[in-house]
Each structure stands twice: as C-alpha cells, then as structure tokens.
Image (spheres, grey):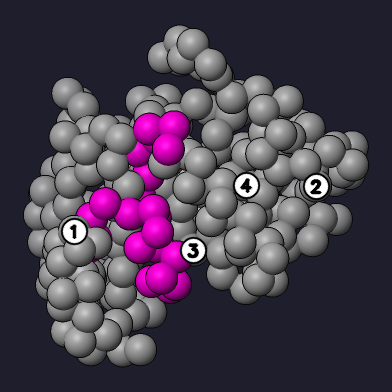
Amino acid sequence: MMLRVEEIETFYGASQALFGMSLKIGSNEVVTLMGRNGMGKTTTVNSIMGIVRPSSGRVVFEADDITHAPAYRIARYGIGLVPEGRQVFPNLSVRENLIATAANRFNSRDPWTVESVLAMFPELEARMTSMANLLSGGEQQMLAIGRALMTNPKLLILDEATEGLAPLIRHEIWNCLERLKKAGQAILVIDKNIDDLKRIADRHYVVEKGQVVWTGTTAELDENADLIQEKLGV
Ligand code: ATP
C-alpha cells in the first residue's frame, strides 16, 4: 500500500472530528471518500497533509511514518493536494502559480511541465500572465489541479474539485481525472457526484461521524446502492 491511515483521532480544540479513521490506497489506485457534509472528509485529508494533527493513530506513506511531519515535508514525500476552495496563490500569475511548486523529485521519465498542464487544460494558455485571483472559478480549479500535478506527486488528493462549477467544466475535470487514472496516477478523491466517481474509482470509503462505515469496490457499491444512498442522504 502507498498510503495507510491507521485509526486516527483528530480534534479541533475540545471538539473531536475523527474517531478512529482508517483507509488505504495502493499505487495506481483511485479511491474515494464519500459522506455527508461535516462527516470528516476534509479533516481526514488535512490530517494526512499535516495541516491538522491527529492526536492518536498513524499516517504512513510508503515506508515513512508521516504522522508528525510538517506539511511542507509531506508534500515533498510525494503527496499533491488540490485543496477544498482551490486556494491558488491570488497575487501570482497563472505561470507563477504553476512553477512555484514545480519539482520532479522522483525522476519521473515524463514529468509534468507547464506545457503538459496547458495541453490538459488549454483554457489556461490565454491566461498565463493574469493574476490567479482574476480567473473564473473553473479556471482557478484547473490551475489548482495543474499546480498539484507540477509537483509530480505519487499520490494526488482532490477535495471537492468540481464543487460549484458549470457542467462543461466539471466534465473537463472528470476527463482529466480519467486520463490521470489511465496513466497510473494514484488518486484520493472527495466529491459529491457518485456517478462520476464510479467512472474512475477502484474502491470507496463512506465516512460517517469521523469514521469509515462502509468500504468496497465500485461493483460492491452498486450492489449496496440502497445502503449507500441512505448513508449519503441523497
Ligand atoms: P464538508 O463536505 O462540509 O467539508 P467534511 O466531511 O469534509 O464536510 P469536515 O470539514 O472534515 O467534514 O468536518 C468534520 C467536523 O469537524 C465537523 O463537525 C466540522 O464542523 C468540524 N470542523 C471542521 N473544521 C473545523 C475547524 N477548523 N474548527 C472546528 N471544527 C471544525
């Protein structure tokens, strides 16, 4: 397994958000985290990334225990994050956003470059010198994905990358994820749209109140559609 989250508990002050959260992602796997609002998906991602600290449990990435590593080092281990709400660098240009964190730490033979990001998202080409805060929501989301790809991550994490976007842009983002999956990229994806998730995902975790209440493959998800619908409240 590439990433192992083992029984983590995470608090915000006195308020507990994760209650023994566990999950695993293999190399080349696409895995989803599903659940209603406030169930702990973003807290799980932020606990993996070192943005919030689990008070117990472990996060292991390949051979390394990263539970207590600082966020910048976790990124260098090879985890790329597309955070909830995009969080592009607002007063850097699109090009500067893309090159700010660019690296090929694991000597990929075919690393992501500004050119290959533009081939994935051609809309960004005309915006290269614009400040990122002047982009549309969809363009910012493409930039946030491009920025994460420029780190040439072993594992890419996307937290609600299609939320609030127009259908055409969503479609483009799912196509991008499908291409990444075909290229063997390991991905952890949080999204509300189950049908789109099913197109690309190997396995799923359903989260309720800070822990996993169901896990299975996409085929098993279909077999348990009623139960999953109930857990997701849709
Ligand atoms: P959403 O889709 O709404 O982001 P989520 O499943 O990602 O939902 P989290 O954002 O991880 O859920 O929230 C889990 C719990 O932790 C919720 O009860 C939430 O109110 C609480 N929480 C999240 N962030 C904070 C924070 N910064 N301070 C205090 N409590 C927080």
Q: Nearer the viewer, residue 54 or 49?
A: 49
Residue 2 image point, x, y percent: 22, 33
Q: Is the residue marked 3 within 8 Å of ligand 1, measured from its CB?
A: yes
Q: Earlier in the sequence, mark 4 or mark 1?
A: 4
Callout 3 amino acid: Glu
Q: CA distance from mark 3 to mark 2?
A: 21 Å
Callout 1 amino acid: Thr
Examine the structure image and report whether residue 175 is included in the region drawn in magenta. no
Residue 119 image point, x, y percent: 71, 34
Which image quarter: residue 130?
top right
Q: Nearer the viewer, mark 3 or mark 2?
A: 2
Mark 4: secondary structure:
helix
The part of the chain drawn in magenta is 182-205
Mark 1 and mark 3 residues within 8 Å of each other at the beta carbon? no
Q: CA distance from mark 3 to mark 4?
A: 12 Å
Which residue is disc 2 drawn over?
A: 123
Q: Nearer the viewer, mark 2 or mark 1?
A: 1
- Taking the image as shown, residue 105 lies to the left or right of residue 103, namely left
What's the mark number on residue 160?
3
- Taking the image as shown, residue 1 lies to the left or right of residue 149, namely left
Callout 4 amino acid: Ala
- The reply to whether residue 20 is visible in this rendering is yes
Query: Neighbour class for label 2 at 10 Å: few (<14), some, many (≥20)?
Result: some
Which residue is disc 4 drawn over?
A: 144
